Image (spheres, rainbow, N blue to C red):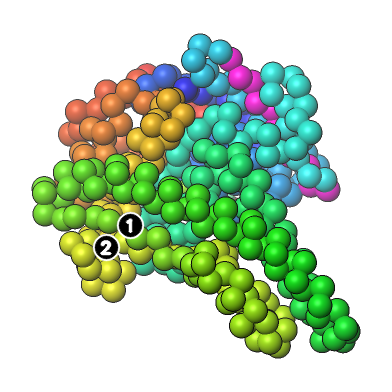
Amino acid sequence: MYIKSLELSNYRNYERVQIDFDKGVNILYGDNAVGKTNVLESIYLSSTTKSHRGSRDKEIVRFGEYEGHIRSLFDKNDVDYQVDIHLRTDKSKGIAINGIKLKKAAELMGVINVILFSPEDLSIIKNGPSDRRRFIDSELCQLDKVYLYNLTSYNKIVNQRNNLLKDITYHPELTDTLDVWDSQLISLGTKIIDRRTLFVNQLNEIIYDIHKNLTGENEKLLIKYDPNIEIMEYSQKLKRNREKDIKYKLTSVGPHRDDFIFFINDMDSKKYASQGQQRTAALSLKLSEIKLVENITGQKPILLLDDVLSELDSNRQNYLLNSIGNIQTIVTCTGLDEFINSRLTVNKIFKVSGGKVVREN
Ligand SMILES: Nc1ncnc2c1ncn2[C@@H]1O[C@H](COP(=O)(O)OP(=O)(O)O)[C@@H](O)[C@H]1O
Ligand SMILES: [Mg+2]
């Protein structure tokens, strides 16, 4: 699949901009803070309904305006998908596909697959567990609607249970109602654990070879799912922690506390690997994401590379650029130097400045 064109109005620093992309490799270059990431963000949002920066709609609408629009035109299997997103400062967003309004934003998930790679992704191993969970969840939610539904419901139940835990302090007679929430938690939580287990297996089948190649056969990379609780002990652990949960007014166990460990040559890379090794493993992770989406959906995703090339040494840059192959890629960078020595064919170059995106070649 690929994006043919993008039209933004009152989106971040853009009053109005229109871009026609190439099916192949597109470069957006320009100084800092001119709006390069904003363009990628809008494409990411057109696929996932969310900003990869975690921004809220009212922060995305151009300062001083009430609403903003994204119109993107995608091609998937020679079928056109026009995605319209209407962002508002005072209401939740409206989304339409080919002019038909969606009842729920979540219906957009999985229609278009994009993979966004930004410098922050390179520290996924060093960061806390929530970043790794966010990675796994955002991937799974794009690929599996049932997972998306289960995760959304699970998070809702955790919130409601936490509210109940607060109420119990003043109304101890409510304690018994926890049983109802707990059985729902177990039912949804179990499904999440099962799917994450399968996902990590699917990822491992791909990442091993990619990482081996990337490190000149020197490193074996294996991701291990580290669930906060085993399914077998779920209900027992919830019960055992009930007193504590009431005291702290928080649900202390469950998949919302899961983690994922990256083993390099059988050693926990968070503890023992150098920063360079950790970053290479993160690159392998991103590259396997492309393959995984292809395997699961039968479609090549759209790749968005936000300023990552300058973060990689020339070996890894080349590896990344060579593995792009025939998938649509939109790269942002401050200068064009990175491409001079690479074998990559660049199809379109755009210069970003002063709220405009102008084609250069
Ligand atoms: N809601 C908004 N309205 C207007 N300008 C915005 C808004 N949000 C961000 N910006 C501007 O966008 C610019 C940053 O854009 P970004 O795409 O991150 O730049 P870069 O080219 O470095 O990737 C900043 O100048 C910032 O002030
Ligand atoms: Mg940027």
Q: Is 77 left or right of 214, judged from the image as shown?
A: right
User: Residue 123: which numbered mark, if any?
Assistant: none
Residue appearing at x 27%, y 66% in the figure: 269
Task: Quickly name the residue at label 1.
Answer: 223
Mark 2: few/some/many CA within 10 Å (<14, 14-19, 20+): many
Residue appearing at x 17%, y 48% in the figure: 212
Q: Is 69 left or right of 272, judged from the image as shown?
A: right
Task: Quickly name the residue at label 2.
Answer: 263
Q: Earlier in the sequence, mark 2 or mark 1?
A: 1
299 lies above or below 161: above
Report helix, strand or loop for mark 2: strand
Query: Which one is nearer the viewer's eye here, 190 or 107?
Result: 190
Mark 1: few/some/many CA within 10 Å (<14, 14-19, 20+): some
- Residue 339 sits in quarter: top left
Q: Amino acid at mark 1?
A: Ile
Residue 265 placement (x, y as % from top left): 18, 62
Query: Which one is nearer the viewer's eye here, 355 or 323?
Result: 323
Q: Which contiguous range is marked in magenta? A: 80-90
